[in-house]
Image (cartoon, rainbow, N blue to C red):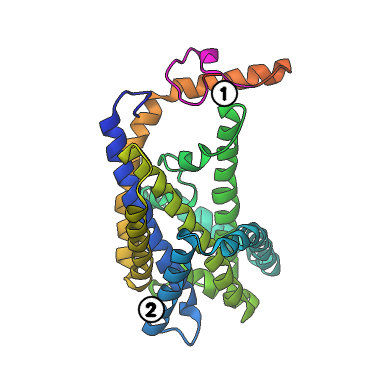
Amino acid sequence: MEHALKQRWLGVIFAIALLLTYAVGYNMLAAYNTQDTFSSFSFYNRTTSIVIGVILAVLFALSIMGGAGRLTKVTEVLVPIMGVLYVVVSIVVIIMNIGSIGKVLGMIFGSAFDFKAIFGGFTGSAIMWGIKRGLYSNEAGMGSAPNAAAAADVSHPAKQGLVQMLSVFIDTLLICSATAFMCLFSGVVPEEELAGAAYVSASMRAALGGFGPIFMAVAVCLFAFTTLIGNYYYTEGCWRFLLKKDPGKGFMTCWRLFCSVLVFLGAIISAGLAWDGADLTQGIMVIINVPVIVILGKPAYDALKDYQKKKKAGVDDHFHESDIGLTNTECWKG
């Protein structure tokens, strides 16, 4: 926005929106979902959510303050393993209940082509919910993922773009689909009191007994913790952009403590506030970023064609801005 469009003011507004989304909206929601995972256990009550909030906030603070590097490294190893196990468990549940495949497919297609609901306004509502929840799975179109992608060391930007596309496939088509099919095949009927993570836990309990909710709780805790850390580091880049320099130590200490408090608050707020807050802040990001994507689509497409051309010719694929007629990049001047 600043270099390609020459509009720093727009970049500033977007950076502020990203700060609100990731430090407030998303991290509070991640904390809420973590404690909500335990709602299927008999010991769960209001005190439980407070205790979980305190533990999350303390571990989060230790990690971003630099005192828990080993903990962060351990989760970086465990999370991919847990992701694979999660998909495997989902497949096991589906196989265990494969006799229900006709009923499940009937539910899917029946709901998708319910013309009475469609003409009753259901379609607009379904699309709205699909867009909102879809953003939580992969962030496509929000403009946040480039914060992580920009840190990669690659010879051509198209390479990292293809990796980002793969992440959308893994997050949405693999992990989310695995969760959906597992819940449908479990036979558990979704009810208001089973909204969110509690529904997935109930589905696992129905399919796998007492092991199901335990596995779900461990998986969500690992996923949520690394999400909290990743979300926070997005905000540090935003502060560097806003201040045009590295923030001072005192400023960052106060910011990190503030973010830790938000994690605690997220664990004790209501489901409506957690979800609505994240929906609002991410919506602001999308409204700003999507028009920018459309405007800047051509150079991105040109970069992809340049990469494909070089790969096909078997030549050095290192990218230089002059390869596609650009003159205003920071990282690809050769």
Which of the two labelled residues, at mark 1 and mark 2, occupies the earlier sequence position? 2
Q: Quadrant of residue 73?
A: bottom right
Residue extending furthest front? 249
Residue 304, which numbered label?
A: 1
Mark 1 nearby-residue class (10 Å; few <14, some 14–19, many ≥20): some
Position in image of residue 38 (x %, y %): 48, 77
Q: Secondary structure at mark 2?
A: helix
User: Which of these two is toward me, 334 or 54?
Assistant: 334
Could you give the CA–CA distance between mark 1 and mark 2, rounded to whole angstroms?
49 Å
Based on the displayed image, in which of its 4 quarters is residue 168 positioned? Answer: top right
Q: Residue at x 34, y 68 (%)?
A: 271
Q: Which mark is residue 27?
A: none
On screen, 332 above or below 200?
above
Relative horizontal placement of residue 30, taking residue 270 as reference (left or right): right
In the foreground, 117 or 135: 135
Asked whether the viewer can see residue 319, the reply is: yes
Q: Residue furthest right?
A: 314
The region drawn magenta spans 318-332
Q: Main secondary structure of the magenta part?
A: loop
- Identify residue type, mark 2: Ile
Judge whether residue 281 is colored magenta: no
User: Is residue 282 or residue 71 the one in the foreground?
Assistant: 71
Residue 329 at what x, y percent from top left?
45, 22
Residue wearing tag 2 = 50
Query: Can you see residue 120?
Result: no
In the image, is residue 70 above or below residue 307? below
The local secondary structure at tag 1 comes to helix
> Residue sitting at 67 percent across and 60 percent down?
81
Pick the quarter of the image with the N terminus: top left
